[in-house]
Image (cartoon, rainbow, N blue to C red):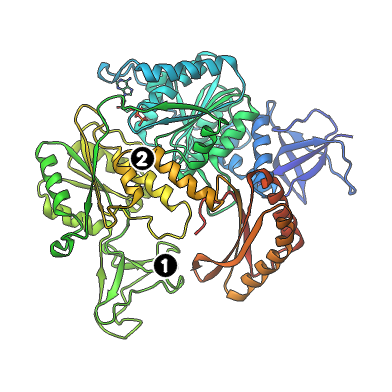
Amino acid sequence: MNFIDVVLSSGQAPTFTYLDPSATLRPGDLVQVPFGNRRIKGLVWETHAREPDFATKSVDEKLLERPFAPTHLIDLCRWISEYYLCPPGVAAGPLWSCAGKSTFVRLGLGKRAPSKSKIHEPKPAPEASRRFELNAAQQAIATTLRAALDTGGFQPFLLHGITGSGKTAVFLDTARHALDKGKQVLILVPEIGLTPQTVKRTAEALGERVATLHSQISDSERADAWTSLRDGNCRVALGPRSALFAPLFDPGLLVVDEEHDGSYKQNGDSPRYHGRDAAVWLARRCSMPVILGSATPSLESWHNAKSGRYGFLKLPERAAGALPQVEAVDLREGRKSTGSSISPRLRTAMSDTLAKGERVMVLHNRRGWAPQAECLDCGAAVECPDCPGLRLTWHRESSRLVCHHCGYSGPLPKACPACGGRSLEPQGWAIQRVQEEMERLFPGHSVVRLDRDIASKKGGHGLAMDSFLTDGGILLGTQMIAKGHDIPDVTLVGVTDSDIGAGMPDFRAAERTFQLLCQVAGRAGRADLPGMAILQTRRPDDALLRDVLAHDYESFAARELDTRRILSLPPYSRMVLVEASSEDPASAERWIGKLAATLRPVVASFGGAAMGPLPAPVAVVAKRHRMHLLCKSSPERAGDLRHAVVEALVANPPPKEVRAFADVDPVDVM
Ligand code: ADP
Ligand code: ZN
C-alpha cells in the first residue's frame, strides 16, 4: 500500500495521511485532498508504506503535472521542523508564503486572470565608469570559487572582506560562472539590504533577470517572481531570509551577504529558523558551494572558518580608496556645557565636509523625538502601563508617548504618575530631535532621516535614499543606514552614541555593537575621496572601541571568543531557550518550573545545564509576564539537548493560560 503524508495549505500543524492509489506521488507534488467536508490543497511531505490504524481516504487528485516545489525544499522544511522543534505545518509556512496566494491563480488553479509580469529586466551594459576588472586579491578568490563550482559538491566558504573590499564583485563573478554552467543562483541579503540599487546592480552585473522575493511586493508580483523561478525562466533569486524558499529546481550556488546580520534569524514567531544556517544546510543537501560574506562575520562563522570547517577567504584591503580614519570623541568633556547631541568636534567636521560639497552620514540609534518623558520634580520617567519598567518614547508629530516593545501609545499624562507633580517633559535625544538640531546647525543643507517610522511606509526607504542622493547633505538614521549603501561622496560618518550595547544583559551585545560601529564607519570614503568617522562615546578606553578605531576585527573576535570559551557560550556551547508567558505571573513560573524539574537531570546526564526559571531580561511585555529556561550543552551534544527539550515539552504540555515556545540557537535572549 502507498501512503502519503500531506501538509495542508490551510496551515494545520500536523501532517495528514492519505492513500495514493496511483503510487506515483512524490514529495513536493501539489494535491487536493478531502478534509472533513472540505477539499483542500496540500503538499506531499513524505511517501511511505506504514499503514495507519485508522481508515485512510484517498487523495482526490494531483493538481500540477510537475512538482509544486523541488524535493530539496520539502527536505529543508522537514529539517526545520526537526531542528527548530516545530510541527510540519509550521515549518512549511514560509514555503507557502514565499509562493503567495496569486501563485495558484497563475498556475491555472484559480479563477482570476493573471496580470502582467514585473520582473527586473537588466538595463543595457553599465556605464563604463562603474565597470572594472577584479583586482589581484579578488581574482585569486574568484578563481578558488570558480574551481569549487567546477568540482561540484558541498563547499561552505566564509568570505571575510573589510567594508568596501569588493566582496560583491567577487560573488557576482562566481554567480556568473554558475549561470554559465546552466545553474540557478540564490542570493540572500539582510532585510534592509534589499534596496532597488541592490537589485539593479545585481541584474546589470549578471546580465540576467532577477526575481526578488520579499514582504513588500504585491501578491501578483510575488506570483510572477515565484512562477518564473519555478519554470526556470528566471535563474537568479534575490531576497531576505524568506527567499530561501524560492522554488529553484536546479540551484548551483548560494550566497549569504552580510551573513552576520540579525535579520537572518526569524524571531517573534515560528518557525524560528536561522536563514544562514538553513542556507548552509540547503547547500549541503544540494551539493553546492555556499558563500557567507561579511566584513564583521558572526563569531559562529568565524569560528567555523578558523577551525577549518569552512573555506576561509580574505579581502584585507579596500578595492577603491582607503579605510576611513576613525576617531573617538570623549563626551564627558564639555558636552554638558553645549547641551547638544553633537559635540563641537563632530559639528566642525560636519561643517567642513558640507562646505566641500561632500556628504555626511550620522547614526543615532533611537526612534522618536525624546527617549523618555521625565518629571522635573521627582526625576521619574513615564513607563508603559503594559510593560512595567520600560520607558515610553515621545513622538512629537503624533504628540504621543509610544512603547517600542508592545506598541502601546497614549498622551503625555497631565500629572507625574510617581509624585503627582505637574512638570512632565520629554527629555533626552531621539532621532527626530537630533534632526531638528541639525537643521538649525546646518542651514541650507538637507537633513534626510531614515528610520523604521519612515521605512515602514511603502517605498519610504527608497524615497529617503533618493532624496539624500539628489539633495546631498546629511543622512541621519538608525542602524538601517549601516548596511549595504555604497555612496561615493560620503566622506564623513558620525555616531552620536557609540556605547549602545554597554551594560545590556545579552551575551551578543558586544558583538552587535562592534558590527554596527564597523559597518557604519565603513560607509565613509568608499571611492577616491578619503573618509573619516567620528564616534562619540563616554567610554573612550573601552577595548571594543579601540578595536573599532583600529579596524581590527581579528583582535575583537579573538578577545570575544576567549570570553565565550571561558563562559562556555556559543560557539563553544549550544542553546535552546524555552520561553513561557502568562498574564498572571505565577502560571508561567509554575509551568516552566515543572519543565525545568523534568529537564534538569536529563540534561545533566550529558554534561548540559538548564538554567532557570528566570524572569526574562525584559520581564513584562504587553501585560504578559515572561519567564525563561535557558538550556545549554556542548556542541557535540546539541542533538541530545534538542531531543531532551522535546521530550520534556511533550511530557509537560503548557496549560491554556501559558504561551510557550522553544527557540533553538536563540539570537534574541532578551
Ligand atoms: P563590499 O561588498 O566588500 O563592501 P563592494 O563590492 O560594494 O564592497 O565594493 C566597494 C566599492 O569598490 C564599490 O563602489 C565597487 O564598485 C568598487 N570596486 C569593487 N571592486 C573593484 C575593483 N576591482 N576595481 C575598482 N573598484 C572596485
Ligand atoms: Zn509596552
Disc on the earlier residue, 2 or 1:
1
Viewer-proximal residue among 83 and 319: 319
* Left-right relation of 321 to 34: left
Q: Position of residue 52 (x, y in %)?
A: 88, 45
* Amino acid tagged 1: Tyr
The residue where tag 1 is placed is 408
Q: Tell me the residue at 55%/18% (across/down).
A: 149
Where ligand 1 lies, by quadrant? top left
Q: Is mark 1 within 8 Å of ligand 2?
A: yes
SS at mark 2 in the image: loop
Viewer-proximal residue among 464 and 271: 271
The residue where tag 2 is placed is 483
Q: Tell me the residue at 83%/29% (across/down).
A: 23
Viewer-proximal residue among 459 and 128: 128
Residue 262 visible in image: yes
How far is mark 2 from mark 1, CA to CA?
A: 29 Å
| 661 up-or-down from 8: above or below | below
Crowd around label 2: few <14 · some 14–19 · many ≥20 (10 Å) = some
Q: Are marks 2 and 1 in contact (CB under 8 Å)?
A: no
Q: Position of residue 282 (x, y in %)?
A: 61, 32
The N terminus appears in which quarter of the rendering? top right
